[in-house]
Image (spheres, rainbow, N blue to C red):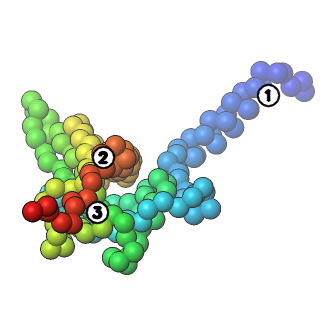
């Protein structure tokens, strides 16, 4: 029996489709390593991660709390548990609201990252205004429960906060004595 080139091509196409379709659920892969850092930067203490979502939000809060140190690592920051050794304090907040557009229910999602100097929002020196912040919003059909949505949103909010931190002008320290 003769084999035609068309049969071989059909076999390869079928094999390609089988392999590519089998890997679709794992299409969003990422890894982090301290070895990838060229130099370590400032340290950050993660003060609080909060999620305001109707229904089950505890697992989303836990996922964001576990993902945030890795995203800081990606940007060259190390997350410290020791308050005395942290240069900055960070707070992550996420909100999800439902609203109606016509006959369809849509979601409005906001993820926000706030950065303070070493004294975080729980300290007595806290004045209410963060040193830098990044905020990302989304309106559509997806929910905050989707890791494919909350991970990129957190990453973008963190990137925006760190960019704002770099662009922050240096404020000179007040002078110790006043002339009489």
- Looking at the picture, does residue 179 appear above or below residue 8? below
Q: Label 3: few (<14), some or many (≥20) within 10 Å?
A: some
Q: Which quarter of the picture shows residue 179? A: bottom left
**Label 2 element class:** loop
Q: Which residue is mark 3?
A: 117
- Cα gap from disc 2 to disc 1, whole angstroms: 62 Å
Marks 2,1: beta carbons within 8 A: no
Q: Residue at x 74, y 32 (%)?
A: 11
The numbered disc on residue 80 is: none
Q: Position of residue 48 (x, y in %)?
A: 25, 67
Q: Which residue is mark 1?
A: 8
Q: Label 1: few (<14), some or many (≥20) within 10 Å?
A: few
- Residue extending farthest to the right is 1
Left or right: residue 154 compared with residue 102: right
* Residue 32 shows in the view: yes
Q: Earlier in the sequence, mark 3 or mark 2?
A: 3
Left or right: residue 93 compared with residue 128: right
- Cα gap from disc 3 to disc 2, whole angstroms: 12 Å
Q: Position of residue 105 (x, y in %)?
A: 14, 39
Q: Which residue is mark 2?
A: 168
Q: Residue at x 67, y 36 (%)?
A: 16
- Looking at the picture, does residue 138 appear above or below residue 173? above
Q: Label 2: few (<14), some or many (≥20) within 10 Å?
A: few
């Amino acid at each position: 029996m003769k084999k035609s080139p068309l049969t071989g091509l059909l076999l390869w196409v079928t094999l390609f489709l089988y392999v590519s379709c089998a890997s679709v659920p794992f299409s969003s892969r990422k890894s982090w390593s301290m070895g990838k850092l060229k130099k370590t930067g400032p340290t950050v203490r993660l003060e609080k991660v909060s999620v305001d979502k109707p229904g089950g939000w505890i697992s989303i809060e836990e996922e964001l709390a576990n993902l945030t140190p890795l995203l800081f690592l990606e940007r060259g920051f190390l997350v410290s548990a020791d308050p005395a050794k942290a240069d900055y304090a960070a707070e992550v907040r996420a909100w999800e609201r439902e609203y109606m557009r016509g006959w369809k229910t849509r979601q409005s999602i906001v993820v926000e990252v706030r950065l303070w100097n070493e004294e975080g929002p729980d300290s007595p020196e806290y004045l209410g205004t963060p040193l830098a912040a990044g905020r990302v919003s989304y309106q559509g059909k997806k929910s905050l429960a989707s890791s494919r949505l909350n991970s990129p949103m957190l990453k973008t909010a963190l990137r925006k906060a760190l960019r704002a931190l770099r662009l922050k002008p240096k404020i000179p320290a007040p002078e110790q004595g006043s002339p009489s």
